[in-house]
Image: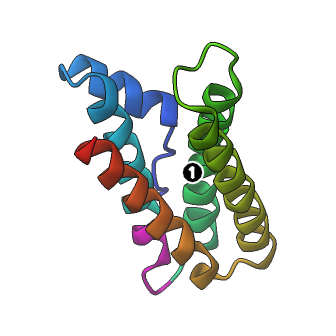
Amino acid sequence: MPRPTFSPYGAYERAQRSGIKGRAAEALAFVRAANALEAACRPPVSRRALDGALKHNQKLWTLVQIEAAAADNPLPAEIRANLLDLSLFVDRQTIRALASGKADLALPLIEIDREIAAGLMAG
């Protein structure tokens, strides 16, 4: 049975429908991305599942890049710059994982997503 595809936009939509707003919705999107990556990394690793989870995570981080680069973003410039730097690492790591198909290359992405989610929930 094929795994369902995940959409970061869908995660936000589901969070909105459930009444979750703001940072909690963003945290939920990162938790779901991390969980999808973790599930895809469990043996036996399916290349299709891994690629799908990596692409889903990459889309989520593309949204982060768009928001962090927006001129009207209320975050301090230093935090926006750090998010953009982190998103570049996520992009490079994702490309490495997609090119190789090695699940262990997704492990740093899982950790990053969970740390971002924890920060959003704490803030």
Name the residue at 58% across, 67% down: 50
The answer to which of 12 and 119 lies nearer the viewer is 119
Assess disc 1: are there few (<14), some (14-19) or many (≥20) residues with their C-alpha within 10 Å of its C-alpha.
many
- Quadrant placement of the C terminus: top left
The answer to which of 92 and 81 lies nearer the viewer is 81
Name the residue at 28% across, 27% down: 15
Could you say where residue 27 lies in the image, as x and y percent from the top left? 34, 42
Could you say where residue 115 lies in the image, as x and y percent from the top left? 39, 60
Q: Is residue 34 above or below residue 111?
A: above
Magenta-highlighted residues: 38-44
Name the residue at 19% across, 23% down: 18
In the image, what residue type sits under mark 1? Asn
Name the residue at 32% across, 24% down: 22
Relative side of 28 to 73, left or right:
left
Which secondary structure, mark 1?
Answer: helix
Q: Is residue 82 above or below residue 107?
A: above
Could you say where residue 66 lies in the image, as x and y percent from the top left? 68, 28
- Quadrant placement of the N terminus: bottom left
Q: Residue most toward the left? A: 19
Q: Is residue 34 above or below residue 5?
A: below
* Picture quadrant of residue 81: top right
Assess whether residue 65 is covered by the magenta stretch: no
Disc 1 designates what residue? 57
* Picture quadrant of residue 34: bottom left
Q: Is residue 20 above or below residue 58?
A: above
